[in-house]
Image (cartoon, rainbow, N blue to C red):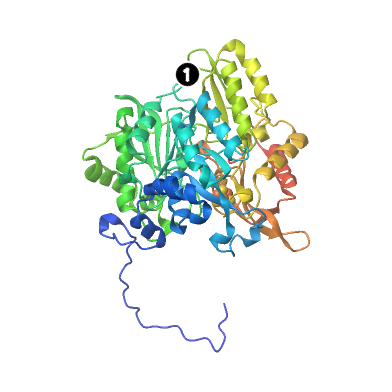
Amino acid sequence: MTQTPTARPARTATPRARKPRGEGQWALGYREPLNANEQSKKDDNPLNVRARIENIYAKGGFASIDPGDLRGRFRWYGLYTQRKPGIDGGKTATLEPHELDDEYFMLRVRIDGGALTSEQLRVIGQISVDFGRDTADITDRQNVQLHWIRVEDVPEIWRRLEAVGLSTTEACGDCPRVILGSPVAGIAADEIIDPTAAIADIVERYIGDPQYSNLPRKFKTAITGHPLQDVVPEINDVAFVGVEHPEHGPGFDLWVGGGLSTNPMLAQRLGAWVPSEEVAEAWAGVCGVFRDYGYRRLRTRARIKFLVADWGPEKFREVLETEYLKRKLIDGPAPATPERPGDHVGVNEQKDGRFFVGLSPIAGRTGGQKLIDLADLAEAHGSYRLRTTPMQKILVLDVAPDRVDSLVAGAEQIGLSARPNAWRRSVMACTGIEFCKLAIVETKAQAARVVDELESRLGEIDTPITVHLNGCPNSCARIQVADIGLKGQLVPGPDGEQVEGYQVHLGGGLALDAGFGRKLRGHKVTADELPDYVERVAKNFLAGRTDGERFAQ
Ligand code: SF4
């Protein structure tokens, strides 16, 4: 750059050495809160907000809620205020948080391992019908999210959920979120190890435990024993991935430090093999390292991935072993990497000769009545177990061979397909502007439009192409690991005005293609032209690929 004559000369004096600023790590003595979130958690353990919801806010209504609880501690029970209708995405960044708040809430029901009984599914569906205007979305973390919830109704909702063994405890907030678990745990013929007991152990011992309820930020866990690594372990804070040890047999390989958002990182192996009965203890150790050594000064650096990136896996393992577990972990081999993560859609045989049927809504969108209808349908076909999946799908388990066709036909009638076109199967979307206060653009209806258009224009394709839509720069729908990732933002429209659109990321993936899509400079597409764009990209790929080539290769 050319300097102007008036530019000041560069300073040559040696700058005084700055004392490094602490990262707010408790283990290094930084116990004083360094930001408002840390202060709020110190002022009162967020788990205590439950009593106030039951005794004060449910009686006094929205206006009675303390702002610190409303925008902070409510999250520990899965409650977020939803976006006031009618506020366009251009105002998301300019309005104050309270100006975006509706008096209604999103409520996230925690479903560890995605495991539901038909009765539990019916209860969630009925809550949606009675209190949530029939909204119900299956998320990519196996939860079900309801909307339009009033604080007055929350105690009754908890009563109904807890009567069937469900909860919303720590469904959001700086705490251990829902445990992702293989949707085919215990039923798949090719499973390496069943993670069911390990997941239950963690939930029973540690969820809702005040020792682990004030973490630097959210803490995401994934556990699978299936060779198709069906819980996106690469992008979780901690993951246990099924592997056969040559001497000790089946167990789990321990990974830490994965995550997406603005600084995406893939989890790293610690090289340790953990038997099923020790998973909960190892999990608590990793969670403890995060709690005590995690960075609390800046929210943007408060995920465990930054600590793992700075320390490296060797130091992380050493601290875990010496300070938390007080013993050495057993060295173990890496699991084989599948070509793609499994989504379990379709009709598949279980190891006991019965079948599970993987059903696909579009981008996770269902509804309360639809969930009730599905519970009824499953029971009418002799099934009492279902599983949500991290791909926004739902499985019906334990179907007798002679009942499969009837179940598939019945599911089709309620809008859930066991034989979806590749587009319906591969499109995911986050909540978006309909309900999310951070959103800039719409996502769910846009996803449905893309599926409809692509199905009719291109029909069936032999290689799935994943298309993930986010409503803002966060990555709730995992855009960086999609073949075509779409990050919602305002983009120049045909007449130069700002319109809803997306920044495109191309070529991300998981499993064999684990890596983040490339953000192509200037590659932005308006919402209106999105189906045309996806069609063009898909046609180019299908026309130019070599034999067996995958999109992300
Ligand atoms: Fe909301 Fe953004 Fe997450 Fe979508 S990606 S749910 S818009 S925060």
Residue at mark 1: C-beta within 8 A of ligand 1: no
Residue beneath the point at 35% across and 33% down: 204
- The location of residue 462, given as percent across then percent down, is 67, 30
- Compared across the picture, whether 283 is left or right of 166 comes to left
The residue lying toward the viewer, choosing from 117 and 490, is: 117
Does the image show residue 413? yes
Q: Where is mark 1, residue-wise? A: 189
**Quadrant location of residue 194?**
top left
Q: Is residue 258 visible?
A: no
- 326 left or right of 163 in image: left
Look at 25% across and 43% down and name the residue there: 324
Q: Position of residue 299 (x, y in %)?
A: 43, 58
When the figure is inspected, residue 96 is found, relative to residue 518, above or below; the finding is below
- 404 left or right of 60? right
**526 to 366, vertically: above or below:** below
Label 1: state its secondary structure: loop
Residue 123 versus residue 170 in the image, above or below: above
Q: Residue at x 66, y 29 (%)?
A: 420
Position of 269 compared to 81: left or right? left
Residue most extreme to the front: 59
Nearer to the camera, 406 or 372: 372
Q: Is residue 197 above or below residue 304?
A: above
Amino acid type, residue under disc 1 in the picture: Ala
**Quarter that holds the C terminus:** top right
Q: Position of residue 241 (x, y in %)?
A: 41, 33
Q: Position of residue 424 (x, y in %)?
A: 66, 34
Quadrant of image for the N terminus: bottom right
